[in-house]
Amino acid sequence: MVMQLPQHHKVNFTSSKTFTSSFISEVKETLFPDDPFKYFYKPSSSTSSLSSRLERIWNLSAYFLPMLKWLPKYTLSKFQDDLVAGITIASVTIPQSICHARLTHLPPIIGLYSCFVPPLIYPIFGSSKNVAIGTVASASILSASIIGDEVSPIENPDLYLCLVFTSTFFAGIFQTMIGIFRLGILVDFLSKPTILGFMSGTATIIILQQCKGMLGLTHFTIEADAVYVVHSLYHHLQESSWETLLIGLVFVCFLLLAKYIVGPLKKGLNPLSIGHLTFNNQHLRTVIKAGIVTGSLALAEGIAVGRSLALMNNDHVDGNKEMIAFGMMNIVGSFTSCYLTTAPFSKSAVNYDYGCKTAMSNVVMATCIMLVLLFLGPFFRYTPLVSLASMILLSTGSLIKLKEIKELFKIDKFDFCICIISFLGVVFISMDIGLLISVSISVIKILLNAARPKTYKLGNFENTTMYQDVEQYPSSSTFSGILVLRICAPLFFANAGYLRERIKRWVESELDLVTSSGCQNLEYVILDVGGVTSIDKTSIVMLSEVWRYLTKRKIKLVLIDPRIEVMEKLVIAELVNLIGKEHVFISIDEAIISCQSSLLHHSDNSI
């Protein structure tokens, strides 16, 4: 039984916005949720006109250059923490950067170069104080896969290196532009299941490719799928060295027995590579593809890592600023002999665990890398390849998140399928095709959810104004002669036909229930559209068709709480006049009271 509350709230049918104000509001909420323009009109605390202007200029500059926010407040105490964290991540970065360069089929020194310049750029533009900048295994092997299909790193290493620098440049341009134009939503299509499957597949490929280093093979495929790797392993197994394998398994002996080493690492800082960028038509398509694909993956990982670590301290990371920061450091990096960098989880976690306070820890790390490049580089030439292979095996093994995949299977079978398809696509086809397939399936899932929105039959808890899904809460009571339905989705052309048929099915089911139970005939269908955020012409026509369908059966249609964006379109299309303004209510409770009163009055007149 519904609480008998008097109806006293009138629906506003006149409120509307001009097209210009609506358009500006939608663009602002979509692209600028953080309102960067507030610094132009924010009241200043300064009384002087000049001081006010300077304060606004400073605030605006600090918005675009986050370093200006924390640098004036930087203290010696914070530097001590950043110093410890920076030195620690440098010790992790040096061997990892050499490993990742090898995964990309680049000279090992390029790995060190890539961890010197970008970490100096990130603190200027980046909004996270926890992430550590460096190369990542997944982007490294993906870049090698795409560019290696075009140019062999063994047969033409110079051109291959130029294409890697050029793809890094396009990755930086892509990242910067989607940050400037606030299009971070594009990266959101890389869902957690997609990334989970991709990372697991990538780790599998990386582990298989380390057979070359672990077995001491001199010939091995550069292809990035399991079939080629296993085939190459089978044909070149006779080149294997049991000594090298033993060293890999018994790591403490590797310095005595290993035969294959990194090779020369020359002294000196990054040479300029801007003159090596290649934009000729023959390879342009490949480097753009490599740049966009690897840039997207690097953004997804970097932003996810930054946000995850920020949540631990209740901090905020601006995704669009992160995109610009990653883009700028990759653009500058492509000019200075660096390949793609982002914020790896492993190094960022170490940075966080060792108590970094600001992005200055990246500057400390870069300084350590600089000292290695200037003075210690040649000492790394005797690092055994088998030790690097062992490091890669240990580090990439953690990328296979079996626990998360198992949890995904329990929570959402569809997401689990996306994860597995991503994994199989990467392992057996190629990294970019596997990623594309899984993203496509994720988009299909989005379209299915949008095209087939849920509708619920609502019931009421006795002596309350709460209305919930009767399937979820069987104890809630329905109303004689009244069917209450809730729609929780934007109404547009893709789901209009489905919703029309779904509403008809609800009505027919209710009429069958009336016939079988002998209850009062259905006279009102109430649609709660408070969760409908938008509506188009096709959906308005659909609602008018539903109204006609109900009218033929002498059933009245009632609307509940249409939002202003929906209401103004219903008024302009004259659907409100068709339904009747008296059948539009602010709340379900007031609609139920009105309908029950009308039913009671109709019953009294019949008597």
Image (cartoon, rainbow, N blue to C red):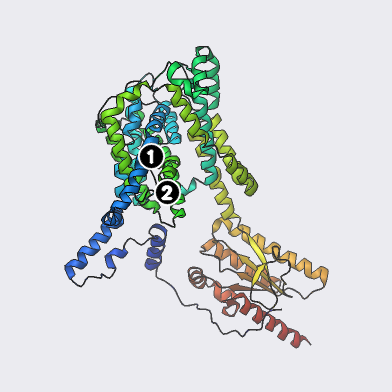
Instruction: Count the marks.
Output: 2
**Residue nearest the observer in this picture, 2 or 27:** 2
**Residue nearest the observer in this picture, 29 or 584:** 29
Toward the top, the furthest residue is: 238
Regarding residue 341, the answer to whether it shows in the image is no
Crowd around label 1: few <14 · some 14–19 · many ≥20 (10 Å): many
* Of callouts 1 and 2, the N-terminal one: 1
Q: Quadrant of the C terminus?
A: bottom right
Question: What's the residue type where badge 1 is placed?
Answer: Ile
Return the residue at label 2: 306
Res 528 quadrant in image: bottom right
Percent across and percent down for residue 77 are 31, 52
Q: Quadrant of the N terminus?
A: bottom right
Question: What's the residue type where badge 2 is placed?
Answer: Gly
CA separation, marks 1 and 2? 16 Å
Residue plotted at (37% across, 18% down): 155
Percent across and percent down for residue 142 are 45, 33
Up-down relation of residue 545 to residue 343 (above or below): below
Where disc 2 sits, the SS reads: helix
Residue plotted at (61% across, 43% down): 416
Return the residue at label 1: 89
* Labelled disc at residue 570: none
